Image (cartoon, rainbow, N blue to C red):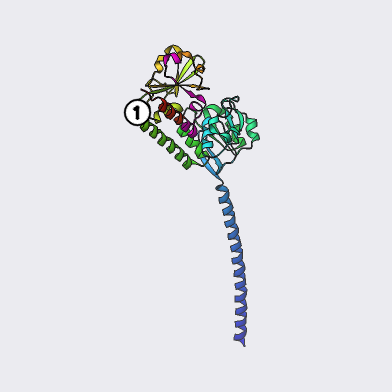
Amino acid sequence: MGVSLNCKRSRRGASALGLALAAVTALAATACSAGADGDAAANASEKSTRVVEHARGISEVPLSPQRVVVLEPVHLDTSVALGTIPVGTTVLSEAAGVPPYLGAEAAAVDTVGTVPTPNVEKIAALRPDLIIGTETRHSELYEQFAAIAPTVYMASQADPWQDNVRLVAAALNKADEADVLLDDYRERCQEISAEFGTKGKTAQLIRPRDDNLTLYGPTSFAGSTLECAGFTTPPRDWEDSISIDLSPERVAEARADLVLATTTNPSDRTTVPTVLLDAFPGLRLVDMSYWITGVGPLGGMTVLDDIERILSDAPPA
């Protein structure tokens, strides 16, 4: 009998211990589950943004920004080319607005001032989730923009335009898509060069303005596109700049196998100075809205369309 009583007590103790262990296990499981859920929530939060390095340091930007404001032509062109239509953009001229070559969707984007002088209040009113600007133009506005939304700055509009395209694409989390666009651009260049035999030919773009003639060099958007298509820019001291100015009296220094001048109306030769028409009877007029301000993948392809058309009409001698 004594042994029997001892056994009952032992079973009851084991049963109580088992219940206690089960309770502890359940609590631990609950705690672990809560911890796992918390970690998952934290990870989801972390994955909603990404870090982008830029001219002002680093910024955490949305993985997929939906309400982007851009402050430079290359930002606008690249965003549209990548399928991210901004909610706001600056323009070089409020009268001219968004360049027509960018299409109807871009034309409908709200304007928020000019490239040199963005309107901070208009930008804030659009509730952007990303702002893309330029250090050389908008340095003093960075803190104001960063208080509105994550802000990414490229260093300078004078930097190689394809590098700036890649920065914009990085901010939009579309780097691979941008690489495809730039590859297509270079492939088109090679096709034009091969078809028209541009290797060994020279080309010079001139922009008449005020009392000067601005010549664009090989590191400019237009100059680099001409070189991509096989042309060579006539050698000169570019003074570490994308362009240099000449007085009209020195117009002959702009000679090349193919000389082009920008205008707002390429079909009207009276829109360029007579000094250019006299110096270069075969002068070709091109639209400044994309040869000068159309910086980006779409502008590049549009310029290449012009080059192909011009060479088809009358290849340079």
Which residue is more in the foreground, 250 or 47?
Answer: 250
User: SS class of the residue under badge 1?
Assistant: loop
* Nearer to the camera, 317 or 89: 317
Which residue appears farthest toward the bottom when viewing the image?
1
User: Which residue shows up at 44% across the image and 24% down it?
Assistant: 242
Query: Residue 128: in sight, yes or no?
Result: yes
Residue that label 1 marks: 199
State which region is magenta: 277-302
Residue 5 spot, x, y in % from top left: 62, 84
Q: Quadrant of residue 256?
A: top left
Quarter of the picture holding the C terminus: top left
Give the residue drawn at x 44%, y 13%.
278
Q: 293 or 55: nearer the eye? A: 293
Query: What crowding class fits label 1: few (fewer than 14 Cα within 10 Å), some (14-19), or many (20 or more)?
Result: few
Residue 283 x, y percent position in the rendering: 43, 19
**Residue 120 place in picture, x, y as percent:** 63, 30
User: From what the image shows, is residue 123 above or below residue 283?
Assistant: below
